[in-house]
Amino acid sequence: MLTKKQKELYDYLKNYISSNQISPSFEEMKSAVNLKSKSGIHRLITSLEERGFIKRLKHKARAMEIINKDIKENSASTDSINIPLFGAIAAGEAIEAIENHNEFVSIPSSMTSPNAKYFGLKVKGLSMIDEGIFDGDIAVIRKTNNVENGKIAAVLTQDNEVTLKTIKFNKDKVTLIPANQSYQSKEYKVGEIQVQGTLSGIIRKYI
């Protein structure tokens, strides 16, 4: 599944290389997809290569190989649904809970289950990078107040701060565990935290 900009660049590269037998310059690509910076083009190219849509040929200037694949564009359709996007969630030190009910994000319907409610949270911080969760990602959260031991959950503390961590229960204690050795686990009494939902998936925007 590609974003609109990724698909625009892929289609442009495919047509250009087919006609000219050489890759376009960064300046040409920038103009073709209406971006202001070459760094944005670099991010798009890297994301296309990571997904296996193109292959950059080493030691050759302006040389790329197009790998033909079926493309699904990441846009609202019958295969996607819109869920509310609420402020931010800390994957680091907890931050004050922020809610914004006016924003929505489109996610693949395959990430959801019938009869369940979902919302998105913008991730800030790097404490969950070993679980593949990065700063700037959108965490898709299945709304629930219950969570299985060892699952990743969105948790609200008694100080009205929210964080995304692996949760472990031990009698009347709850431990919030990061996935980054640079961060420490934190322990709470059961009544000091409220589970807001469990992690269903991650949406990453490359541009």
Image: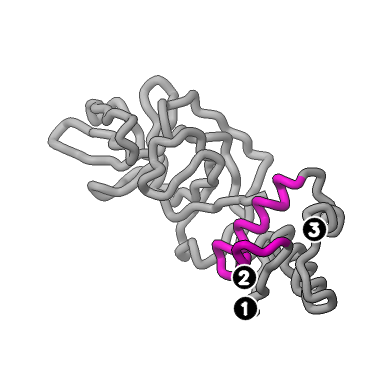
Residue 74 image position (x, y, % from top left): 65, 63
- Residue 141 left/right relative to 38: left
Q: Are marks 2 and 1 in contact (CB under 8 Å)?
A: yes
Residue 83 image position (x, y, % from top left): 59, 52
CA neighbours of label 1 inside 10 A, class few (<14), some (14 to 19), many (20+): few
Q: Is residue 63 above or below residue 164?
A: below
**Magenta segment: does it hold 133?**
no
Q: Secondary structure at mark 2?
A: loop
* Residue at which label 1 appears: 69
Q: Compare marks 2 and 1 and give the one earlier in the sequence.
A: 2
Residue 206 image position (x, y, % from top left): 63, 51
- Residue 118 left/right relative to 37: left
* Residue at which label 2 appears: 53
Q: Amino acid at mark 3?
A: Ser
* Residue at which label 3 appears: 25
Q: Secondary structure at mark 1?
A: loop
Magenta highlight range: 38-61
Residue at the spot 22% in from the left edge and 26% down from the top edge:
189
Q: Are marks 3 and 2 in contact (CB under 8 Å)?
A: no
- Residue 10 left/right relative to 116: right
